[in-house]
Image: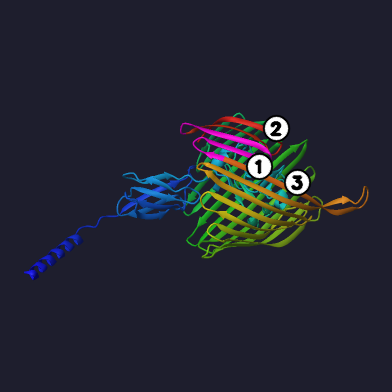
């Protein structure tokens, strides 16, 4: 009897197992979505966890470079938990069907370089005013650079186009109307071998087409952007110094694996007219990326009837392998010419550059670059000078703990000094960084730079802080202290022989920037001892009322702007 019962139970179990195996398995649920920050930029690298109704994790993924993610779970999740560096963890309810789109608010304090929303909210919109909120950029008349390196002259470009007058050293910093720039991109001085002359003072590019506001109209400036891939921008500003205008166009086209782009601009300000044209092409294979660029710019100034003109022609070709520890190679050539009255000068700067970035399992990152540079300088009536030089650059970033890291770097650059084929500068720096990847970022940096022809030595210390004090309240601040010793030629006594002496000039700069990042945004800055402020109040979904007051870095005049912008 017991044996028959056992036999019957076994048959029943086999039947249940057979029917379960024959029944189709429940299909996993595929959930897709996209993550953006409060400015609409893609949020890459965010950790996405899918939760069921009881809060159990049933799926995981990381967002891709474009902010998208895709994960599978046994059933449709009830919610998502999104965690990203420099933002608070957020819980997002999952709709009954369709993809998930969500906004994850990043902390403003994490942005060392101002975002498009930061640039739109700054009360002063010139390139110098935008640059000097970046640690540790400093502005002077006709000079803009990182930490006063390379004697205060960094490289300033507009949409990648280099405007530079060889005769008086004037760059692009003062050409554009206020608030014509929508974003900036910055490169470190240790990347100087890839660019060339004056890049040891840092590189900053003003972007005209990457902007938060498509239209802006205030009592001091106006701008209008039309289109996206093919775009046209017109901007103007007016003040007691006169009116500044610029018109720029950009287009981009993909033909198979090759992408070509073209940018052109022209503008004027009192006594000055400028124009530029840039073309680039980019292609890729499975193993290598290739690109090339051509730029031409010209600027003409008529001051008191004395013509002062400058032109720059540059060519570059790049090849970089894909994958870890790959090499990047650049060949670059630039010709700078200037005419001031009867004086005509010419300078050429060319190099073959090889660089690589190596990473170790413990997170250490080593960047190494070397350039074989060639320089030629020719002036009216002067004997042409030419020279070759090897320009190395090395930087190391290594973690010391979960929050602390160490940085050290050294590199050579060229100054582009008039009358000299190649004038050297050498930079060494070391620093510590603290980053809790949540609310606090703190950097300390010590550096020394030595220049030649004539001799100059700059030593300094700098620090910058990014702190999310409370939800939506961010503090960004930086401070710089250095001493600049330069050789100067002075008479030993009145009417006596000329001798060389060292001139020591201490230098200090500080900036404090406080932001309330709510639907209505408030910004307060203390810069160069002056208080600046701006408020942006939304008027519906597209329009914004803006009002701000600032003192210009160059000239010291205070302005008050009030108007409307449209996204």
What is the crowding at mark 2: few (fewer than 14 residues within 10 Å), some, or many (at least 20)?
few
The outermost residue toward the front is: 2
Residue located beneath label 3 in the image? 167
Magenta stretch, residue numbers:
515-541
Q: In this rendering, does residue 480 appear at all? A: yes
Answer above or below: position of 195 versus 366. above
The outermost residue toward the bottom is: 3
| Apparent side of residue 163 relative to residue 228 in the rendered image (left or right) | right
Q: Nearer the viewer, mark 3 or mark 2?
A: 2
Residue located beneath label 1 in the image? 128
Q: Nearer the viewer, mark 2 or mark 1?
A: 1
Q: Position of residue 465 (x, y in %)?
A: 60, 48
Report the Cα–Cα distance between label 3 and label 1: 21 Å
Q: Nearer the viewer, mark 3 or mark 1?
A: 1
Q: In this rendering, does residue 332 appear at all? A: no
Residue located beneath label 2 in the image? 241
């Amino acid at each position: 009897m017991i044996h028959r019962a056992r036999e019957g139970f076994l048959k029943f179990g086999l039947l249940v197992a057979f029917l379960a195996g024959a029944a189709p398995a429940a299909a996993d649920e595929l959930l897709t979505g996209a993550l953006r920050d409060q400015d609409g930029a893609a949020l890459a690298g965010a950790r996405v966890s899918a939760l069921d109704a009881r809060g159990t994790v049933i799926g995981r993924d990381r967002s891709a470079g474009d902010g998208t993610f895709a994960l599978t779970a046994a059933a449709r999740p009830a919610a998502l938990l999104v965690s990203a560096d420099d933002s608070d963890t957020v819980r997002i309810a999952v709709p009954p069907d369709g993809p998930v789109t969500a906004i994850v608010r990043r902390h403003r304090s994490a942005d060392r370089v101002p975002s498009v929303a930061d640039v739109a909210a700054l009360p002063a919109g010139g390139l110098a005013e935008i640059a000097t909120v970046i640690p540790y950029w400093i502005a002077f008349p006709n000079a803009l650079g990182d930490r006063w390196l390379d004697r205060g002259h960094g490289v300033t470009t507009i949409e990648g186009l280099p405007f530079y007058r060889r005769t008086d050293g004037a760059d692009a910093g003062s050409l554009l109307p206020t608030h014509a720039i929508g974003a900036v991109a910055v490169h470190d001085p240790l990347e100087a071998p890839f660019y060339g002359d004056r890049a040891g003072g840092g590189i900053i590019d003003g972007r005209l087409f990457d902007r938060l506001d498509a239209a802006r109209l205030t009592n001091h400036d106006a701008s209008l952007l039309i289109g996206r891939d093919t775009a046209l921008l017109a901007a103007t500003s007016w003040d007691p110094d006169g009116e500044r205008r610029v018109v720029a166009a950009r287009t981009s086209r993909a033909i198979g694996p090759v992408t070509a782009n073209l940018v052109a601009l022209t503008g004027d300000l009192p006594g000055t007219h400028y124009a530029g044209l840039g073309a680039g092409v980019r292609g890729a294979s499975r193993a290598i990326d290739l690109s090339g660029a051509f730029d031409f710019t010209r600027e003409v100034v008529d001051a008191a009837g004395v013509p002062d003109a400058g032109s720059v022609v540059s060519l570059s070709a790049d090849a970089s392998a894909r994958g870890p520890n790959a090499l990047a190679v650049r060949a670059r050539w630039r010709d700078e010419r200037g005419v001031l009255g009867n004086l005509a000068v010419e300078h050429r700067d060319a190099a073959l550059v090889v660089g690589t970035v190596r990473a170790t399992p413990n997170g250490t990152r080593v960047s190494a670059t070397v350039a074989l540079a060639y320089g030629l300088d020719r002036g009216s009536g002067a004997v042409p000078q030419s020279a070759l030089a090897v320009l190395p650059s090395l930087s190391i970033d290594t973690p010391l703990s979960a929050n602390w890291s160490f940085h050290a770097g050294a590199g050579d650059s060229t100054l582009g000094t008039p009358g000299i084929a190649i004038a050297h500068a050498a930079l060494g720096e070391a620093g510590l960084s603290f980053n809790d990847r949540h609310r606090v970022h703190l950097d300390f940096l010590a550096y020394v730079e030595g220049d030649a022809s004539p001799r100059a030595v700059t030593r300094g210390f700098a620090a910058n802080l990014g702190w999310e004090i409370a939800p939506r309240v961010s503090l960004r601040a930086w401070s710089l202290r250095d001493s600049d010793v330069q050789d100067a030629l002075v008479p030993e006594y009145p009417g006596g022989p000329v001798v060389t002496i060292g001139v020591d000039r201490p230098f200090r700069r500080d900036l404090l920037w406080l932001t309330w990042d709510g639907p209505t945004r408030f910004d307060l800055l203390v810069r160069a001892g002056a208080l600046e402020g701006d408020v942006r109040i939304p008027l519906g979904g597209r329009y914004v009322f803006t009002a701000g007051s600032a003192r210009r870095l160059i000239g010291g005049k205070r302005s008050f702007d009030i108007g409307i912008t449209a996204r």
